[in-house]
Image (cartoon, coloured by chain):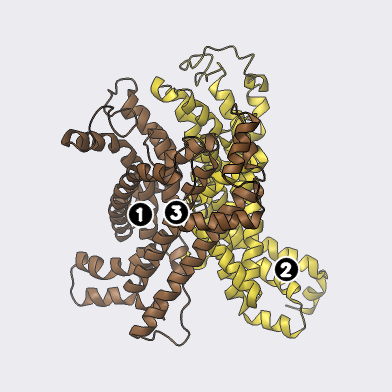
Chain colours: A brown, B yellow
């Protein structure tokens, strides 16, 4: 969870510079310039990630070989072998060049733990994470925005009071603790509660993942983790949407719409909600990192064999190439998703392109 | 005011005037804050937990934290002697919970101080100083904002090792960008106010402007944001400890959940070990969030007319 999400105040602060000359409709070419600038900005961020990734692992961690030997029985010869293999004795600039070339070719080296290429291990683990995060994100956006809209529209009523209390509580909860609770209640079973759902993992051992039974089995395994993440993610969407819609509700154009005789539902759907969505898009794009955190911890709780579990397993070794790989993939995913939401914002609201 | 009355008014030094003004403004803010029921509720909960943390050795004997002399059964359900059951060493979960409050709150506050200092200094500098420094700091803030913080924090924690100080440091250096952006936008608007121009015309240095005119004006925002940051920091401390980066020699709510999880409390159905630490975290984080939101409404009049 992002620590500094400023739910109440954020929508009032336009995060992008506004042209002092007022909204000038952007011409086609200037749109492309704007897109180019955004892409370049993201590329710069990615470059920063690449450098940080290198610095973290090679400079702060001056002696990766020692980290490697820690807690494991390895002879000095074995350690030396690894040092030679990864060029850990070379001067730093040279190491950086090797590292750059590897990143460009998406070659993250071999995992210390599995002695297999990190890239292949990550590819194997990609889809559980994509499924888990994808389903949860879509569900939480739909449910969260709905809750936020209804709460704001009926501000102070029962629904608003209950849903706001609920969402703020969810927002204050470590998502993995919610997972632990759901796990112990619905998978282990407490007291009279029967065992309803499987205990962790993505699939029952021995079932073919691509058969019909396999797909149903996997869906069954995903129910609890998806519920956990959906509840964890939706809190923020609901709170931000409520706050953004409340900002819109005093606006004159809504009075105009009502004066035209439009029904309340139409005023809400066609006029208010659409405008309230803009700040939501910005805020959500700033909190993509939270989605990654959720994936890491919830996969650990439910033993889902995805990138998150791969990361926490690697932390215990510590498996440096693996950590470098997952850190890069997570950061790159967030940077790209951020770029997409920025571009989307520009499509939704041409004013920001100026 | 008559001449006689004016003579009665004692002469005040500028410092006294300032303090009087601050006292008045604090009084007004408090009056405004006390109208927020949720904020007061949060404050009550926080006071309770602060007292528990301060009085921990009085409430529960510190000897109860020792793993070797623990007398209870291992992972036993609540009984009359052990109100919240026992952990995997046979220690009372209630004792751990009371002492854990100290570490969790301490790490949360320590991390917040680091995060707020970094965020405020960088925010003011990037809003006030023009040119390259501003551009560079702004970029840096944006970069740190985009990088997913948990992987970064995990990597940092792996490299630095787990202890109370490093966990606080890791949380501090990964959470400052949000504050920095907020302070920056606040600084940008204060910078344009007429009294700033007056001070500049009178020959005030940049340092003077930043410390005497901008700082006092962003402080309320910093204050409101601090409470929200503590909430996040405590959550992050719990998460990092849960993933194994807590201080192995101290008990916090996060490390309790870590040992509950790694000792199979989940499959054994040891709910007394899983529920209480999490409930405490939720209560404290919720309380900080409620207080923070109330403060925000106090200091940001634009929000006041809404909820």
Marks 2 and 1 sit apart, C-alpha to C-alpha, by: 38 Å
Label 1 near label 3: C-beta < 8 Å?
A: no
Whole-percent x and y of residue B166? 65, 42
- Residue B211: numbered disc: 2
Q: Chain of mark 2?
A: B
Q: Residue at x 61, y 14 (%)?
A: B70
Front-most of A224 and A93? Answer: A93
Residue B71 drawn at (x, y percent): 59, 11
**How far apart are the alpha carbons under marks 3 and 1?**
38 Å
Image coordinates of residue A157 in percent, x first then y, are 31, 53
Q: Residues within 10 Å of mark 1 (few under 14, many from 20)?
A: many
Label 2 element class: helix
The crowding category of the residue bearing disc 3, from other C-alpha atoms within 10 Å (few below 14, some 14 to 19, many at least 20), is some
Q: Badge 1 is on which residue?
A: A238
Judging from the image, mark 1 belongs to the subunit labelled A
- How packed is label 2: few (under 14 Cα within 10 Å), some, or many (20 or more)? few
* Residue A94, image quadrant: bottom right
A319 in relation to A14, above or below: above
Subunit that carries the residue with mark 3? A
């Amino acid at each position: 969870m992002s620590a500094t999400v400023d739910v109440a105040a954020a929508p009032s602060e336009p995060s992008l510079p506004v042209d002092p000359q007022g909204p000038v409709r952007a011409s086609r070419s200037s749109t492309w310039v704007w897109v180019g600038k955004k892409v370049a900005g993201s590329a710069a961020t990615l470059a920063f990630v690449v450098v940080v990734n290198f610095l973290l692992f090679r400079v702060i961690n001056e002696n990766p070989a020692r980290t490697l030997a820690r807690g494991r029985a390895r002879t000095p010869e074995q350690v030396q072998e690894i040092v030679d293999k990864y060029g850990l004795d070379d001067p730093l600039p040279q190491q950086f060049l090797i590292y750059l070339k590897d990143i460009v070719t998406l070659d993250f080296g071999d995992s210390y733990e599995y002695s297999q290429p990190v890239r292949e291990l990550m590819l194997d683990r990609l889809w559980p994470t994509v499924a888990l995060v994808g389903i949860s994100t879509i569900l939480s956006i739909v449910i969260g925005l709905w809750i936020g809209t209804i709460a704001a529209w009926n501000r102070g009523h029962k629904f608003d009071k209950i849903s706001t209390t609920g969402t703020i509580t969810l927002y204050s909860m470590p998502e993995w603790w919610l997972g632990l609770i759901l796990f112990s209640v619905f998978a282990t079973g407490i007291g009279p509660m029967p065992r309803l759902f499987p205990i962790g993992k993505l699939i029952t051992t021995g079932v073919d993942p691509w058969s019909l039974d396999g797909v149903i089995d996997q869906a069954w395994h995903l129910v609890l983790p998806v519920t956990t993440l959906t509840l964890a993610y939706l809190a923020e969407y609901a709170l931000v949407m409520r706050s953004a819609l409340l900002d819109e509700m005093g606006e004159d154009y809504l009075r105009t719409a009502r004066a035209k005789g439009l029904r309340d539902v139409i005023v809400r759907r066609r006029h208010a909600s659409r405008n309230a969505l803009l700040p939501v898009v910005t805020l959500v794009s700033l909190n993509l990192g939270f989605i990654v955190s959720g994936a890491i911890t919830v996969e650990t709780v439910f033993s889902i064999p995805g990138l998150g579990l791969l990361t926490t397993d690697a932390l215990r070794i510590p498996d440096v190439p693996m950590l470098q790989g997952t850190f890069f993939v997570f950061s790159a995913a967030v940077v790209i998703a951020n770029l997409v939401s920025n571009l989307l914002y520009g499509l939704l609201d041409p004013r920001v392109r100026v | 005011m008559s001449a006689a009355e004016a003579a009665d008014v004692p002469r005040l030094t500028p410092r006294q005037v300032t303090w009087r003004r601050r006292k008045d403004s604090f009084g007004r803010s408090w009056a405004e804050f006390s109208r927020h029921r949720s904020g007061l509720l949060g404050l009550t909960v926080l006071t309770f937990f602060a007292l528990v943390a301060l009085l921990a050795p009085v409430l529960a004997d510190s000897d109860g934290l020792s793993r070797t002399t623990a007398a209870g059964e291992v992972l036993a359900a609540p009984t009359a002697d052990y109100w919240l059951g026992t952990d995997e060493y046979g220690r009372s979960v209630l004792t751990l919970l009371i002492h854990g409050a100290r570490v969790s709150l301490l790490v949360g506050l320590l991390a917040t101080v680091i995060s707020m200092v970094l965020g405020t200094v960088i925010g003011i500098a990037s809003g006030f100083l023009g040119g390259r420094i501003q551009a560079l700091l702004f970029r840096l803030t944006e970069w740190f904002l985009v990088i997913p913080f948990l992987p970064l924090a995990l990597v940092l924690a792996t490299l630095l090792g787990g202890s109370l100080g490093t966990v606080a440091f890791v949380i501090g250096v990964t959470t400052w960008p949000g504050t920095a952006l907020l302070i920056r936008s606040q600084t940008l608007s204060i910078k344009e106010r007429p009294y700033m121009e007056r001070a500049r015309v009178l020959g005030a240095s940049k340092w003077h402007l930043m410390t005497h005119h901008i700082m006092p004006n962003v402080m309320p925002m910093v204050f409101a944001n601090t409470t929200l940051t503590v909430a996040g920091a405590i959550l992050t401390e719990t998460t990092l400890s849960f993933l194994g980066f807590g201080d192995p020699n101290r008990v916090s709510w996060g490390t309790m959940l870590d040992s509950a999880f790694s000792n199979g409390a989940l499959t054994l159905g040891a709910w007394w070990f899983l529920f209480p630490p999490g409930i405490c975290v939720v209560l404290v984080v919720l309380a900080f969030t409620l207080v923070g939101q109330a403060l925000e409404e106090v200091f940001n009049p634009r929000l006041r007319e809404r909820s």
